[in-house]
Structures are given as C-alpha cells and as structure tokens.
Image (cartoon, rainbow, N blue to C red):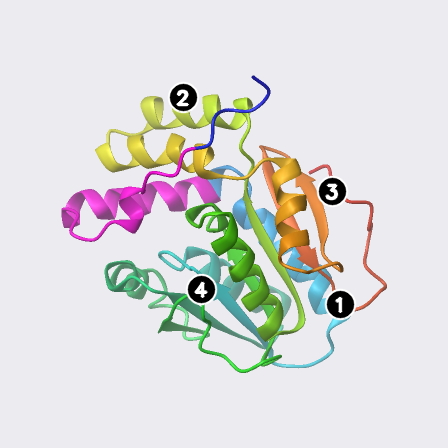
Amino acid sequence: MRYPPKREIPEFLDTPGQDPYEFAGLLAAVRRTNRWYGGYALITRYLDRFAALLPRRPLTVLDVATCSADVPAVMAAWARRRQVALRVIALDRSLAVLAAARQVVRAWPEVTLVRGDALALPCPDRSVDIVTCALALHHFPFDGAARVLREIARVARGGFVVNDVLRSWPAYLGALADVWLLSRNRLARHDGPLSVLRAFTWPELHALVAAAGLGDVEIRRHRLQRAVLVRWPSAAAPAADGRDGR
C-alpha cells in the first residue's frame, strides 16, 4: 500500500470535555511538534518573503485554527526582530483552546484572540494582508477542507500560506515513534499518529486545491513530511517551482 489508510475518526483535540490536565499536555505536544519539526522555521521563512512583497504596514495576519496560538507568538517575535509592524488575529472555535492560548500570548500584545469558525471566517472579503493556517487542514473532511481554503482565499488581500503534514508512511511511523518515545500523554499518543492518518496525500492536496477553485495556489513539499499551499501577493513569486526542499 503506497499510503497509510485514511481515517476519519475524531481527535481528542476536537472533542470537548477532556480532562484539563491531559488537554494541557496535548496542547503542549502540538507546540512541541511545531517547534521541533519545522513549523516555526517554516512560517518565519514565508513571512520574510511576504514582508518583502507587501509594503503595507502594519501587516495584518489572520491565523486560522490557531490552537494554543504558539505560531502567532512566533510571528510576533519575528516581527520584533525584523522591526516590522505587525498585527495578528488568532482565531479558533474552541473555548478551551483559547483559554490556553491566552497564557501563550500574554507577553505578545500584537496578538488578538478571536473565537470563530474556519468554515465561515468572521472577516470581510480581502480584509487581511496574510492568512496562515498550520496543522489544521486535516481536521476537516475533503469537502470541509476545500471550504476552509475558499474562506482563506476570500479574506486574504495579499496572500496565504497553509501548511500541514502529508499522509505518508514516513510521517505515520515518525509520529508513532515521537509520541511513544517522547510523550506519556494519553491524548497525544492518540492524536499524533491519527493526525497523519486524517491528513491528505500529495495527490489529494492537488485535488483539494482544484475542488476549492484556486488555480493560483502553489503546492510545495518541505522536509519532515510537510506540505505548504501558498498564494503569493504578486506574480513575482520566489522559487515558484512547487518544491522548497527544506
């Protein structure tokens, strides 16, 4: 079998009523995944490119399905280092997740937390410069993920960058090894490998972009089994070869 079988069962991250201590451990595991496996480096690399293409300041960013808002905190830190005026709206539908996010971003006034649904973003058309979404697309079935992409494209004035894990054997085996060697959290041990099984393959991502009607989206492979969907602010996209290689 070329790819692991697709699974559609819910993750604990999406299931209300979890034990608060265990849920906090699950969110910590998600942050560790972003930190150790390239999520933070990936988003700052793309912010560098977007900032060079978008002269408007302050830059406005909407982070969709922000989870505990660790990625927006990294964006704010990037902006301070680069001396770029930046405002980030971190959106999630879960009250429990947003409660945890308040602790993560308390030192970052550039970040505003908002409750909202990725399937119906509470933003006018073309109202933010950049839309980001990290490790969230796999939480939706195919039709829902296509709808999320259409919503992201609708509100993005400049462009967007969406990244997620690919459903592949290396990603699945890596997730199994990660949670069983590095985590004792019951929820993380369930959700980590399941996230990969719920994710999309490389061909499915191309079909997803087509279903969303987004012909101007570039699909890139990154190291550690991540894929990126990016729409650049202009036709002068850097290294527009469909593969970043990092």
Q: Position of residue 134 (x, y in %)?
A: 50, 52
The residue nearer to you, when weighing 129 against 73, is 129
The residue nearer to you, when weighing 207 against 123, is 207
Earlier in the chain: of badge 1 and badge 4, it is 1
Q: Is residue 135 magenta?
A: no
Q: Position of residue 78 (x, y in %)?
A: 57, 62
Q: Is residue 196 left or right of residue 3?
A: left
Q: Residue at x 44, y 40 (%)?
A: 33
- Tell me whether circle 4 and circle 2 mark residues in contact (CB < 8 Å): no
- Nearest to viewer (mark 1 / mark 4): 4
Q: Which residue is mark 4?
A: 118
Q: Which residue is mark 2?
A: 177
Point out the stretch of residues depicted in magenta: 7-34
Marks 3 and 1 sit apart, C-alpha to C-alpha, by 18 Å
Earlier in the chain: of badge 4 and badge 2, it is 4
Earlier in the chain: of badge 3 and badge 4, it is 4
Q: Amino acid at mark 3?
A: Asp
